[in-house]
Image (tube, coloured by chain):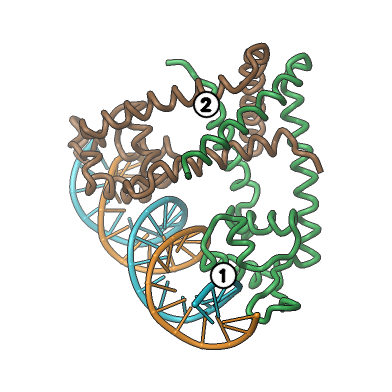
Chain colours: A brown, B green, C cyan, D orange
Amino acid sequence: MDVTLLDRLLQIGELFQRDMARAFAGTGFTPARLRVLWVLQHDGAMTQQALAAELDVTPRNVSGLVDALEASGHVHRAPHPSDRRAVLVELTPRTARIMSRMQREHAELSATLLDAVAPADRAAVERGIGAIADRLAALVEDADA
Amino acid sequence: MDVTLLDRLLQIGELFQRDMARAFAGTGFTPARLRVLWVLQHDGAMTQQALAAELDVTPRNVSGLVDALEASGHVHRAPHPSDRRAVLVELTPRTARIMSRMQREHAELSATLLDAVAPADRAAVERGIGAIADRLAALVEDADA
DNA sequence: TATTGTTATACTCTATAACTATA
DNA sequence: TATAGTTATAGAGTATAACAATA
């Protein structure tokens, strides 16, 4: 049976997960906690409600993740300036530096992968992967409705 | 900041997971159990040790997954013909039919996604994604060593 | 001695429901 | 009355370590 495009894309997804898991094994970073840090790095400090919405996860779940990240010194709960019910979750300076480094490595990996593609194919591959991602996003959205 | 190739590939991986989770919500199929069924459909009946190796998970974990799938009637533990320590885990006939249908849908989705790519770009995209998957596999393997 | 699978234990991620404090 | 976050409880996935049965 031959290998479809979809098989290849699923394989790429699994390899990313394997790579991430291995890269952070023993550091206390788990995939779920990394997602929190990634969102905070990308969008800045936010409330737990906002985090829950961004991660598509329950507020209760966010409480647990932020508890763990606060205990390990990676994030800080600051009072919200205008709403005493809410807290602002922010990266600690040291963790912000770690995430900046990850962002650079992320860009390098992207370049390395594109480098594996024959130069004549690169433009088509970038267009094609964009089109696939858009089509898949539309399918998932339709299914949700 | 612009969207890299890597961002798109990560997005595709997340969309697949979201879609799978949604498609099987309420059916009792969880992602981990589906992986077991998928391997059995693909490679046929095998011991729990073999499953553990294939899934890259501990034998203890396989015990739990097979327990759950046996309780729900999706797999069956048969005695191993020559090794009384081992069991052969096999799909029940009904589940084998379900997995065949999934395999067909999988092929259809692959066709739908390729259809989203401009015809002139298709060959390059298939080559390029293959090259990316191979490069990534090599990187992960190097890191493991 | 080595291998197959299980029991025992523990941690993480996730969810729902009920509750407190604040808006 | 509605919203932000937590406590309580539960289930799934995962791991390590110790053990029984068999090879």
Residue B26 seen by the camera: no
A59 and A71: which is toward the camera: A71
Rendered residue at 59%/55% (across/down): B55
- Chain under label 2? B
The residue to which callout 2 is attached is: B6
- Asked if A137 appears above or below B47 in the picture, the reply is above
Quadrant (top left/top right/bottom left/bottom right) for the N terminus of chain A? top right
The residue to which callout 1 is attached is: B63
Rendered residue at 64%/72% (across/down): B71
Quadrant (top left/top right/bottom left/bottom right) for the C terminus of chain A? top right
How would you rate the neighbour count of disc 2 (Cα within 10 Å): few for under 14, some for 14-19, many for 20 or more?
some
Q: Which SS class for mark 1?
A: helix
- Chain under label 1? B
Q: In which quarter of the image is residue A94?
A: top left
Kindly identify the amino acid type of the residue bearing the numbered disc 1: Ser
Residue A55 seen by the camera: yes
A26 and B90: which is toward the camera: A26
What x and y, as percent, mark residue B128? 66, 23
